[in-house]
Image (cartoon, grey):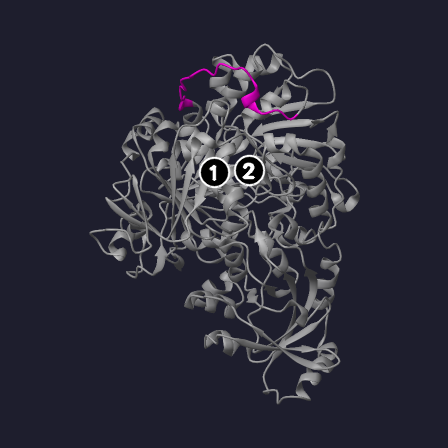
Amino acid sequence: MIKLYSSGVYLLNGKEIAADDGSASVSVSKEQAKKGTISSGIISAHNQSGDERNLMLKFDSLTSHDITYVGIIQTARASGMEKFPVPYVLTNCHNSLCAVGGTINQDDHVFALSAARKYGGVYVPPHIAVIHSYNREMMAGCGKMILGSDSHTRYGALGTMAVGEGGGELAKQLVGRTYDMPNPHVVGVYLEGEIANGVGPQDVALAIIGATFNNGYVKNKVMEFVGPGIAGLSVDFRNGIDVMTTETACWSSIWVTDDKVKTYLTQRGRGGDYRELKPADAAYYDSFIKIDLSKIEPCIALPFHPSNVYTIKELQANAKDILAKTEEENKKTGLNLNLGLKYRNGKIWAEQAVIAGCAGGIFENIMAAADIMKGKNIGSGNFTMSIYPESQPTFLELVKNGAAETFMKAGVLVREAFCGPCFGAGDTPANNELSIRHVTRNFMNREGSKPNEGQIASVALMDARSIAASAVNGGQITSALDMDVKYGKYNFFFDKSIYDNRVYDGTGKPSADTELTFGPNIKDWPKMPALPENLLLKIVSFITDPVTTTDELIPSGETSSYRSNPLKLAEFTLSRKDPGYVQRAKDVMKMTSEDIKPLINKFAARCTLPAVRYSCGSAIYARKPGDGSAREQAASCQRVLGASANFALEYATKRYRSNLINWGILPFIITDESAFSLGSYIFFPQIKKAVMEKTETITGYVLGDTVTEIKATLGELTDSERQILIDGCLINYYAQEK
């Protein structure tokens, strides 16, 4: 079904696969063939450095939603921004509900509209479209690059290389700087065969995630989709796979384009944004995945990660063992699931179903669910179901073609465009319930529960087709392949007037006289200190889970309403993973020179301390932090509470590490976690000099009853990243240039 190659691969004429094992007969050099990928051409066109190995990228447009745009604009304002230099789309699909009461969510929306007017941006009001649907419909185009402050910024199926990053990277673009990184490896994803009726894009995506996430096969790389199997997939189907590539930990994605993409863009009034994209006759891929679509079966990802994948058939055959295994794995992280309760009378049962957002709320997914549910219902019991179309144009089409009526008669709620079910701000199940969802993630708390308060629910990811099949069976987990359904072919009539009449588009038309509208919850970033000559760190959280997600670093859900208030939001840092963190970090911030002096004396008794300044900051240790969301608050909240460093065996994503750097937090990598523990003090003499002089291995000293050495590295850093760390954060870095 899915084959991962152990070597690089030459793809010849788009069809012939030749492994780089010495047997391939290729008329061009490997270096020339590397330039034959679609990715290489697009990256080269956007690279400002003149160096193919070290990129300095400028993007065609930017996009953010209402959890992130206030902080980004505040950072860019403090860094000297006077107008948006490229189109910048501000959507309102995350904080469109008033999760914590009061005016603060709508205050953010009013701020965004005033910013779009002042700086020349695009403002998409609440409930009109989710972020990625609007960008697919109105911004993506063949050969473009888009940078978004949401991790699922993926428009590869439309020929656009899109990247999800923390807000600092967007702020750099807003002040005319570049996105800097080494040129990424490119992984060819070769699709062949035809998909079976009842198998959907989420099934394909989960199969890929299950095969690649845990082994890091595509981590921080580009996934380039090629092969004859693409022609048999609709653009909606491709979009549904593409948006989920984020869960593999890849950096970006791109697909071959064809007449179906041209039609998609033309229907939306943007036929001029189409051009054919395909690899050269000889293209070299650093890694390669071959997928037989005909062998993909309906899948389910059990809690609490999209990579915890089984086929539904496999789960049904071994339910007791698989559910018990999932419970046991989650016990290691302190969670006591009761998934065994879902297995009754030889069947697995869920209490809730949701189809929503940029992955599930796509037109064809919803229509396939309607075909399954036509003339049926979900019953009057405890099982519930909601559908959130991705945009108002999609919703209108569902009303016009009768699908909305089908769902309503079946007892399904059809709701507005909203991302809440994907990040824990809507449709929270009851305690111990299981929700089956076609959304992007099923991390802990993504369903809105609070395990640290004894409230725990869980989400399993499935495709809309199998969710609908399960719904008409009263919540019994059912594969869509087990349903006798005739799926229709439905035309989509895109009505652009919905956007023309409601979306504010001020691109290229800034109005400097416009006053920004600040609600009482919108606060400026606090001042951040520069990196001292010598740094004393106290470990205030020590996490040994295999992976720590950004949802655990700063919870989503109702906390999202405080994203415009750095001090208030910081109170939630690690609140569901390590509730004592905030107070421990604050205690470090209160330490005086008299508190620090005895600790430094331990070091001074062993070594001569240069007569220079030192200061104390907090630090966390986690084995592999940063999986999941691009949200910069996972780092900025630590910084607001006085964090100066993170320690890790590795970082789960580039974007989390970039967030640390942009907020002046040293991203240390170590190899021995036994060298220190919670409460340990670690002293790094002459740390500023080490960063400045690009010292490869930095020596620190653990100050216990005895003084022991610890070795750490900072990984690859550009010169500007080193200076950002020295200055203390991105805002300080730009202030130094004024």
In front here: 586 or 235?
235
Q: Residue at x 51, y 29 (%)?
A: 390
Query: Residue drawn at (54%, 20%), measured in percent from left and top?
Result: 369
Closest to the observer, 309 or 86: 309
Q: Can residue 513 be seen in this view?
A: no
Badge 1 vs badge 2, beta-carbon distance below 8 Å: yes
In magenta segment, residue 699: no
Q: Is residue 231 left or right of residue 645?
A: left
Looking at this view, name the residue that lies furthest to the top.
Answer: 375
Residue 48, horizontal then vertical, whole percent? 31, 57
What residue did someone put label 1 on? 243
Q: In which quarter of the image is residue 436?
A: top right
The amino acid type, in three-letter code, at marker 1 is Val
- The tag on residue 157 is none
Apparent side of residue 176 relative to residue 592 in the rendered image (left or right): left
Going by the image, does 496 lie left or right of 362? left
Location of mark 2 (residue): 440
Residue at the image position 60 percent from the left and 42 percent from the top: 308
**Front residue of 471 and 689:** 471
Helix, strand or loop for the magenta stretch, by majority: loop
Question: Which tag, 1 or 2, sits closer to the chain's start?
Answer: 1
In x, y percent, where is residue 468?
Answer: 59, 22
Secondary structure state at the residue bearing disc 2: loop
Front-most of residues 109 and 675: 675
- Find the magenta span and give its range: 477-497
Tell me if residue 484 is in the magenta stretch.
yes
